[in-house]
Every structure is written in structure tokens, then in C-alpha cells.
Image (tube, helix red, strand yellow):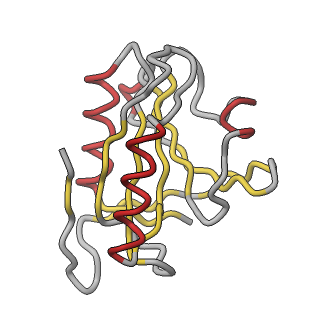
Amino acid sequence: MLTIHSKLINAMIAQALDDHPIETCGIIAGPAGSNLPLRLIPMRNMAKSETFFQFDPQQQLHVWKEMDARGEEPIVIYHSHTDSQAYPSHTDVEHATEPQSHYVIIPTKSLYNHEIRSFRIIDQMVIEERVRIVHQYQPELELQMVA
């Protein structure tokens, strides 16, 4: 199960709507081994596509180095689907390289019901999981939104 703060959900949705009709993408980092998403980092979609995303390799290298230096890992890897359901595509599954991460998909075509979905993708096997949205973490931890 993914437990995530409502402010992070709102930030992902806002980014997805701003980037629409291009798929948005990003990560939410947290302390290594914690499964606690805290720091939202929007990423550039190098593909600039309506049907798939690709992190900018230079930006990804920089962000992953920064996470290592801070003792963090990618807790959530998120992107939007602009004209399909919130379920990992074949391309999404093939490019899922972080088995410990939650893969969140935001459907921008039917966002009126705020139906984000989260999946674990391990060895190309897709497992949907519950999303628990909270309004504060216990103990209270500081969320960060990176511009």
C-alpha cells in the first residue's frame, strides 16, 4: 500500500494538468528504506509525447546523485496518461527499473474523479496496490516541493 500526503497528490495532479496534453513525469523521494514519500521532484519528459514519457538522462543522473548524497531513494515514480486509463502500458512496464518504488499514474482525460492509481512493477509483473491519502504524517515530517 502507498501512503502519501494529500499535498503531494495535489502537486502531481497540478503538474499533470499543466503539462497536458504531454505526459508529465517526476519522482517523490524519501529516506532510503522508509517507504515514506516526502520530496516531490518534477522531471522533464524528453519524449514530449502524449503517449509515453522518458526522463531527461542528464536530469535523472543529477537527481539520483542528489538522492544518494541525501540518503534518499525514489519512493514514487509518477507520470500521467493523457488519453488512456491509469494502468501501466507495455512501455511503462518495460522501463520500470526501480522495484522498490510505487509507480503512480494520473489520468488527465478523466481527472474529474481524481482517480490516481499506484502499482508495483517487479520483473515486468504489475501489481495494483491501495493508495491511502493522509493529511499529515506521524510524526509530522516536512514535505518539499522542488521547482
Q: Is residue 94 above or below residue 50?
A: below
Residue at the spot 30% in from the left edge and 53% down from the top edge: 40
Q: In the depicted view, which residue is nearer to us: 129 or 75?
A: 75
Image coordinates of residue 42 in percent, x first then y, are 31, 42
Q: As drawn, is 86 to the left or to the right of 71?
A: right
- Whether residue 103 sits left or right of residue 99 in the image: it is left
**Quarter holding residue 139:** bottom left
User: Seen from this angle, which residue lies furthest bottom?
Assistant: 139
- Using the image, determine if residue 131 lies above or below residue 81: below
* Image quarter in which the C terminus is found: top left
How many numbered marks have been drawn onto this rendered protein structure?
0
| Res 7 quadrant in image | bottom left
Q: Residue at x 52, y 28 (%)?
A: 53
Question: Where is residue 136 shown, x and y percent of the image?
Answer: 24, 71
Up the image or down, 60 lies above or below 136; here it is above
Q: Quadrant of the N terminus?
A: bottom right
| Residue 31 in the image, given as x and y percentages of width and height | 39, 77
Identified at 39% across, 13% down, the residue is 21
Please state the horizontal and vertical placement of residue 10, each as a whole percent of the image.
26, 44
Q: Nearer the viewer, residue 29 or 81?
A: 29
Name the foreground residue: 22 vs 8.
22
Q: Residue at x 31, y 50 (%)?
A: 41
